[in-house]
Image (tube, rainbow, N blue to C red):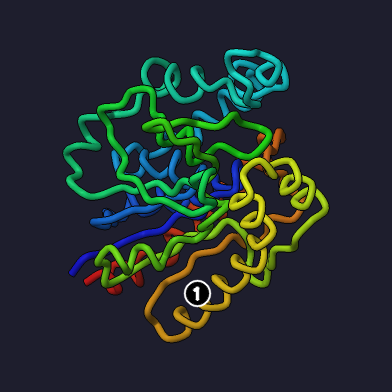
């Protein structure tokens, strides 16, 4: 039997998922397959490497560090992202809060990150390569429109995976998983809307018509995915873990007490559901 887990993105809301990951590590829950979107990928690799508490430490230590995130990074012509790309994806994992590449390799499972091909507007699923110490794939999966430049891999421009496949549980099944746990970053009942900012984004990317059209379809696609997910959950084919509430929590939340509270919610829910997940994975 092949076991899998899916991590939705959501920028700093994904700290909820980090709490779930740490609870699962404490309970010796380690699936064979993981797939993450955006921050779900960037944080998820620390679960695969068994580094409890690493994600929380990074966010609490560096959230208000301008090298990590800040508008000055946007006007740096070599960076052009709200994040300091080299600092966030290279300096932190390779020097300041080291990612354990050896432990990741010892895990022996598969970790995929979702990215959106700018030329086609479609999702692609790429295997995380721990030998790339620049973490280009994770940058690409997290590359929010406007807030990031295009991230190029093999000459192709990519953006955030959540634009095309926010909750890739269907991919997990297609990749051979028999049992799948899905960790969401929005509470029960949440539905996405096509906002005015999304329409503006679609116009901004008219140079890439497939991506532009796909942006306008995103909310409907996300809501249909949630509806199917809820059906699979009721049928007992998937276990879904959701935060209690994300109301008042910004995508780029600055309040560390709110960050810790959302992490604690994930940690608590992860511990409460641990025995059920163990039985489900057997």
Spot occupied by residue 109 in the image (x, y as percentages of width and height): 21, 49
Q: In this view, does 270 lie above or below 67?
A: below
Q: Quadrant of the N terminus?
A: bottom left
Spot occupied by residue 20 in the image (x, y as percentages of width and height): 45, 53
Spot occupied by residue 199 in the image (x, y as percentages of width and height): 78, 52
Counting labels gives: 1
Closer to us: 69 or 194: 194
Q: Residue at x 68, y 38 (%)?
A: 252
10 Å neighbourhood of mark 1: few (<14), some, or many (≥20)? Answer: many
Q: Please tell me in which quadrant of the rendered image residue 147 appears.
A: top right
Q: Is residue 72 above or below residue 38?
A: above
Q: Is residue 244 above or below residue 95?
A: below
Closer to us: 237 or 214: 214
Q: Please tell me in which quadrant of the rendered image residue 277 appears.
A: bottom left
Q: Which residue is drawn at 70% across and 44% down?
A: 206
Farthest right residue in view: 196
Q: Is residue 74 above or below residue 102?
A: above
Q: In which quarter of the image is the C terminus?
A: bottom left
Farthest bottom residue in view: 235
Closer to us: 271 or 241: 241
Q: In this view, does 31 lie to the left or right of 9?
A: left
Spot occupied by residue 60 in the image (x, y as percentages of width and height): 57, 30
Q: Is residue 233 left or right of residue 176?
A: right
Q: Which residue is drawn at 36% across and 40% down?
A: 45
Under circle 1, the secondary element is helix
**Which residue is label 1 attached to?**
229
Q: Residue at x 46, y 53 (%)?
A: 123
């Amino acid at each position: 039997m092949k076991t899998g887990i899916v991590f939705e993105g959501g920028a700093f809301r994904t700290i909820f998922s980090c709490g779930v990951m740490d609870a699962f590590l404490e309970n010796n829950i380690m699936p064979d397959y993981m797939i993450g979107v955006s921050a779900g990928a960037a944080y998820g690799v620390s679960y695969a490497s068994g580094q409890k508490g690493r994600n929380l430490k990074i966010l609490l230590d560096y959230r208000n560090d301008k090298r990590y995130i800040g508008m000055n990074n946007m006007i740096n012509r070599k960076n052009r992202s709200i994040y300091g790309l080299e600092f966030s994806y290279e300096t932190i994992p390779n020097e300041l809060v080291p990612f354990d590449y050896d432990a990741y390799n010892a895990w022996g499972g598969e970790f995929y990150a979702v990215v959106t091909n700018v030329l086609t507007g479609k999702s692609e699923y790429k295997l995380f390569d721990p030998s790339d110490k620049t973490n280009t794939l994770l940058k690409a999966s997290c590359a929010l429109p406007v807030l990031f430049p295009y991230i190029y891999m093999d000459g192709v421009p990519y953006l955030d995976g959540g634009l095309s496949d926010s909750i890739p549980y269907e991919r997990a099944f297609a990749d051979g998983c028999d049992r799948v746990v899905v960790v969401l970053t929005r509470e029960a009942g949440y539905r996405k809307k096509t906002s005015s900012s999304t329409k503006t984004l679609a116009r901004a990317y008219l140079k890439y018509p497939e991506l532009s059209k796909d942006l306008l379809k995103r909310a409907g696609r996300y809501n249909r995915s949630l509806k199917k997910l809820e059906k699979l959950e009721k049928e007992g084919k998937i276990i879904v873990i959701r935060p209690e509430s994300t109301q008042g929590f910004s995508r780029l939340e600055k309040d560390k007490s709110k960050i810790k509270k959302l992490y604690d919610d994930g940690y608590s829910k992860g511990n409460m559901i641990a025995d059920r997940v163990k039985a489900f994975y057997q």
